[in-house]
Image (cartoon, helix red, strand yellow):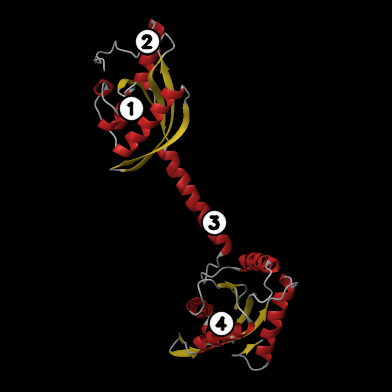
Amino acid sequence: MEEVRNDESVYPVERSELDRLCLEMVREYSCDTVYFKDKNSHFLWNSKQHAAQVGVESAEDMLGKCDFDFFPETFAQAARNIEIEIMRTGMPRLNIAEELERPSGKAYFLASKYPFYNEKNEIIGTWGISHNITDQKSLEKELEKSNQKLQRLARVDDLTGLYNRRYFYETLDRMISIYEARKDDNLTFAILAIDIDGMKYINDQYGHPNGDDVLRMVASSLICNTKKADSSFRVGGDEFMILVPDCDKKSAIILANKLACAIADTRVPMGDKFEKITISLGLSVYEKGMDVSELISSADRKLYKSKRNGKNQVSF
């Protein structure tokens, strides 16, 4: 390889005075990384921003060196492979996403690389420009987190952490569509309607903060005693719903009784004593042709039956 001189009069090819001044302006003031390389991917010319990026004092300190002298091997090899392809085809590569691991954290760049021609229109290397988009990436990640939080707030009940009424209807509608399309008529799902017994008495006697504790206790018990695939929802003040996929009537009855027993076995501190909490349940199993309102009405009727018959029981 030809020796590369380090004085400031060296430029990739012979230039007019105007071109030289333009390159000098780019070198001094460009906010982006700009560089020229020879066929072996050794640097011929670099902007000051490029030098700052790799941590050297001046752009001249990079002359004659290559990416392997400044970057991790995988990063440098990827760059070299792209440059070989550009010199082979004469085609530029635009908007290359680059990720660089640094002691301070990951840095992200958007780069474009081009063939570098001499005055005879021969490819003698490559040149490129790279824009640091780390701040933009950070902002995008923060926006993504905010969007995820908003989506969660839109579907989750603040008090209990269960899914809310809106998301219940969305999920139920989706499940009906899925099971309606299935060919196996024996494969269905169940819906459990749940109401806390005596909730008005608890709120009136002990206050709403204690009532909120009861709601949270019931919600926690529903989560602990159902499978991961099951979905629990708070759809009203003291009303809950559970959707149980791939479940027949017998299995749904077993689950409903398990939930009733688990909550009845729990005592909640109220002032200077502990109160027994119970729930009433009604369940319905989806049959093809049923819509959302029919399925909910069926489960609600069974729930009211449990209430009329003395509460703390399951109707199906």
Q: CA distance from mark 2 to mark 4?
A: 82 Å
**SS for tag 3?**
helix
Residue type pointed to by label 3: Leu
- Which of the numbered marks, if any, corresponds to residue 203? 4
| Label 1, residues with CA under 10 Å away: few <14, some 14-19, many ≥20 | many
Q: Tell me: 5 left or right of 291.
A: left
Q: CA distance from mark 2 to mark 1?
A: 18 Å
Residue found at x 62% / y 68%? 168
Q: Is residue 315 left or right of residue 276?
A: right
Q: Residue at x 29, y 35 (%)?
A: 71
Tag 1 residue? 50
Local packing at callout 2 (Cα closer than 10 Å; few below 14, some 14-19, many 20+) is some
At label 4, the amino acid type is Asn
Q: How many residues crowd around disc 3 within 10 Å: few (fewer than 14), some, or many (20 or more)?
A: few
Task: Give the CA separation, mark 4 to mark 3.
Answer: 31 Å
What element does badge 2 sit on? helix
Q: Which residue is mark 3?
A: 150
Q: Are marks 4 and 3 in contact (CB under 8 Å)?
A: no
Say if mark 2 contacts mark 4, CB within 8 Å. no
Q: Secondary structure at mark 4?
A: helix
- Compare marks 2 and 4 and give the one earlier in the sequence: 2
Residue 200 shows up from this direction: no
What residue is shown with label 2? 20
Q: Earlier in the sequence, mark 2 or mark 1?
A: 2
Q: Residues within 10 Å of mark 4 (few under 14, many from 20)?
A: some
Quick one: 299 or 1, which is closer to the camera? 1
The residue tagged with tag 1: helix, strand or loop?
helix
| Nearer mark to the viewer, of 4 and 3 | 3
Mark 2 vs mark 4, foreground winner is 2
Q: For the residues marked 4 and 1, what is the alpha-carbon distance in whole angstroms?
A: 67 Å
Mark sitting earlier along the chain (4/1): 1
